[in-house]
Amino acid sequence: MTEEKWENKFRDFLKRYCWHDILKLANEYPELRSIEVNFTDLEQFDRELSEELLQTPDEVIPSAEEALKQIELPVEKQLHDAHIQFTSIPNKVTIRDLRSNHLLKFIAVEGMIRKATEVRPKITNAAFYCMRCETVNYVPQSGPKFVEPGECEEESCGKRGPFKLLIDKSNFIDAQKLQVQESPESLKGGSQPQSIDVDAEDELAGIVKPGDRVVVNGILRSHQRTTREGKSTFYDLVLHCNSIEYLDQEFDELDISPEEEDEIIELSNDPQIYNKIIKSIAPSIYGYENIKEALTLQLFSGVPKSLPDGGRIRGDIHLLLVGDPGIAKSQLLRYMVKLSPRGVFASGKSASSSGLTAAAVKDELGDGRWTLEAGALVMADMGIAAVDEMDKMSREDKSALHEAMEQQTISVAKAGILATLKSRCALLGAANPKYGRFDRYEGLAEQINMPPALISRFDLIFILLDVPDSKMDANIANHILKSHYAGELYEQWDKLSTSTITQEKLPLTRK
């Protein structure tokens, strides 16, 4: 298929599927410079064209953007720098499975933003002024290295310079480098999370921050490594970003459809809504109604208040579960992290103070300066940070939590960097007593292995005892058996093609 045919097909597709988006773009251009195209719509329109997009995106995407510029608009505007962002790409590849056969293909990569550099201008078309004949020469800058003209374009001159770069006549776009790391949930045992560098340009620069869980759609490219001996035969992978889709969004960024809004309003009129929310917290764990009520309140939290004198009172609720081993504390923590939009889980023994707050590292993406790398409490900003095994943490690491819990900021003075990071998160902690189990004949305060300054920062502290009780133990055993049975039914329905289990027989929570 020729490029002219691709342009004609895209023109028909855009008019049919994206006309409202094009009108919005025309009204708001140049503040808005792109439209989103759902890959599913393109596949329905022309399967061959959608396949070509995945296999040869460097040829198809310019044709699509050229087709967008040629569409006749009802307003007098020219969309010279308009772009098309393709979303819902089926060609999803995990970072550790990226191979050489994916080069120059259109792929989607899922993960968490680990690092993001500052947004800086990047030159795309450099204007050089010839100091001999005063001619302006234009040199397009497509690669990672800056290219200067070999000789003057003027026939009567043809000299090799000297040249002067004219900033005002050169073209620049915003650019940012990101590092995307695979999500912890997708890791296999014993493997370290792998990451990939992402180049974000124009409208995509500066829209994500460390901690965001995203799907990055783009073209996989490679840059040759250079060593002291010269150019290496090994290449580094770089994903040239075309669009970014959020997996977890903050509450104020969520898009609620009219159907979801109707359902929310209907639920708000239900007199039993409070109890229903409490029962939906970790239904596989028996009992703990008062703890589940506290966890529900922690999810919704209070309202932060700014006082007239400039002070601030936090609205987040900090919760501590202290109890005997084997009573589902860690399960509750993991469930809450999964439920929260920006939930982060850390375990006390394997978490250091810099891992929880912020670490000073040499920047690999930029020019090698010292930069701050956000820790767990900063990553969980506007979410929940769950810290398990808090009693196993060292005294220095525990002291790092004091400012983060009360002021909800983290002040850093490391490697010449003075900064204050926000950590507006609710902390959910779990710990065992000092002697492994509670001694019922000693005071509780002496058995909690935490300094008073830290304990005072928790709003709710629950003491959980594993007391032998035949009736309670029988109910717990019965609930565990029911949970295992429900899980067995779901696994059979999901993975066995010969299963006779229908969706109606499944537990209500898994439908």
Image (spheres, rainbow, N blue to C red):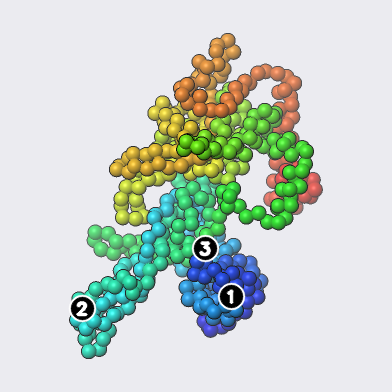
Q: Residues within 10 Å of mark 2 (few under 14, many from 20)?
A: some
Mark 3 or mark 2: which is in front?
2
Q: Tell me if 477 is positioned left or right of 334 in this view.
A: right
Residue at 37% across, 65% down: 122
Q: Earlier in the sequence, mark 2 or mark 1?
A: 1
Q: Tell me if 63 is positioned left or right of 496 in this view.
A: left
* Whether residue 189 is situated above or below residue 454 in the rendered picture: below
Q: Which mark is residue 243?
A: 3
Determine whether the residue tagged by mark 3 lies in a helix, strand or loop: strand
Q: Quadrant of the N terminus?
A: bottom right
Residue 83 shows in the view? no
Residue at 43% across, 42% down: 421
Residue at mark 2? 131
In the image, farthest residue toward the front: 308
Determine whether the residue tagged by mark 1 lies in a helix, strand or loop: helix
Q: What x and y, as percent, mark residue 352?
A: 41, 35
Quadrant in which residue 235 is drawn: bottom left
